[in-house]
Image: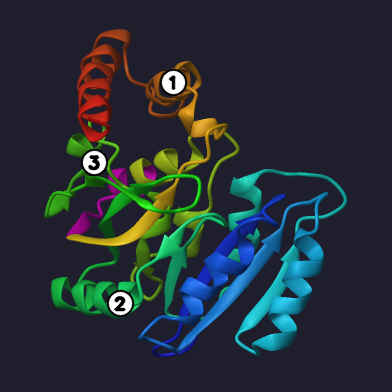
């Protein structure tokens, strides 16, 4: 395992419209000692062709594929995580963007906190990834109990130190809101997540994105409380109420 390299995993499914811009935001990082693992999850658009071109133009980019059928973002991230060779691991969705200082500042922050798990603030972007001014600020630290009521950890902002946390804890389950389920599992294992309250990521929100379906999002989170965490109906309702409140405030 490299002493400094950051491995970045991007799951890709029919993201031809965004891929080049997203990868460009990685290539523009002020911290340049990274490898980028692009995992094609059975795309049916021009994504595969774009991936090959991007990899041929930059030796730091590696390609992987989930197979002959679509397996979902969790499986694609898991495949990328499995093949990651860096000491640090970051996730980035195929339509989101990083600010140029994202990796540099978050690495410094993670080391300063002597921590295994960090995340940052982010800004909602429109379909063109233009900032809308809606910024999600993050708390200095999150424990498992507090995280149950505040899903402020956004996948494209996280950074892990793989010398301190086992890859097995980072493998995402095949459930709705698999990222949130993973953060909770990590925190339940005794880790804390440290928040860097700087806006270093733009969360692109296409009009028809899955996360924009409010009923689906509510159902997924409720299922996590009951099925993944095994909480009682009363405890689930308690945390769910606060989760819904904070989720609403984030969008105001």
Instruction: Please tell me which residue lies in front, 30 or 216.
Output: 30
Marker disc for residue 144: 3
Residue that numbered label 2 is attached to: 101
Dot placed on the residue nearer the N-terminal end, 1 or 2 = 2
Residue that numbered label 1 is attached to: 214
Q: Of discs 3 and 1, which sits in the foreground? A: 1
Figure check: 207 above or below 142: above
Instruction: Look at 43% across and 38% down and name the residue there.
Output: 181
Q: Position of residue 175 (x, y in %)?
A: 56, 33
Taking the image as drawn, is residue 81 in sight?
no
Residue 177 magenta-highlighted? no
Q: Are marks 3 and 1 in contact (CB under 8 Å)?
A: no
Question: Quarter-wise, where is residue 246 in the image?
Answer: top left
Element marked by disc 2:
loop
Q: What's the CA distance linking mark 3 and mark 1?
A: 24 Å
The residue stretch that appears in magenta: 185-196
User: From the viewer's perspective, is 53 left or right of 32?
Assistant: right
Instruction: Please tell me which residue lies in front, 103 or 80.
Output: 103
Few, some or many residues within 10 Å of mark 1 (<14, 14–19, 20+): few
Q: Position of residue 222 (x, y in %)?
A: 40, 19
Figure check: 88 above or below 70: below
Q: Position of residue 93 (x, y in %)?
A: 52, 55
User: From the viewer's perspective, is 148 left or right of 52?
Assistant: left
User: From the viewer's perspective, is 28 left or right of 68?
Assistant: left
As drawn, the residue found furthest toward the top would be 234
């Amino acid at each position: 395992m490299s002493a400094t390299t950051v491995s970045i995993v991007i799951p890709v499914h029919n993201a031809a419209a965004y891929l080049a811009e997203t990868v460009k935001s990685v290539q523009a990082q002020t911290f340049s000692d990274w490898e980028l693992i692009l995992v094609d999850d059975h795309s049916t658009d021009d994504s595969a062709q774009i991936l090959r071109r991007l990899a041929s133009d930059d030796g730091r980019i590696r390609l992987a594929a989930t197979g002959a059928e679509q397996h979902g973002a969790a499986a694609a991230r898991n495949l990328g995580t499995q093949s990651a060779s860096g000491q640090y691991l970051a996730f980035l969705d195929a339509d989101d963007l990083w600010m140029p200082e994202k990796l540099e500042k978050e690495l410094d922050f993670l080391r300063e906190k002597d921590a295994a798990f960090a995340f940052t603030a982010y800004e909602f972007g429109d379909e063109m990834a233009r900032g809308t001014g809606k910024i999600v600020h993050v708390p200095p630290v999150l424990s498992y109990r507090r995280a149950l009521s505040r899903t402020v950890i956004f996948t494209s902002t996280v950074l892990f130190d793989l010398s301190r946390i086992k890859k097995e804890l980072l493998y995402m389950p095949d459930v709705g809101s698999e990222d949130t389920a993973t953060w909770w599992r990590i925190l339940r294992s005794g880790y804390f997540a440290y928040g860097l309250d700087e806006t270093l990521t733009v969360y692109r929100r296409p009009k028809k994105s899955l996360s924009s379906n409010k009923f689906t999002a509510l159902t997924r989170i409720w299922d996590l409380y009951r099925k993944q965490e095994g909480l009682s109906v009363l405890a689930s309702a308690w945390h769910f109420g606060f989760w819904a409140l904070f989720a609403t405030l984030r969008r105001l």
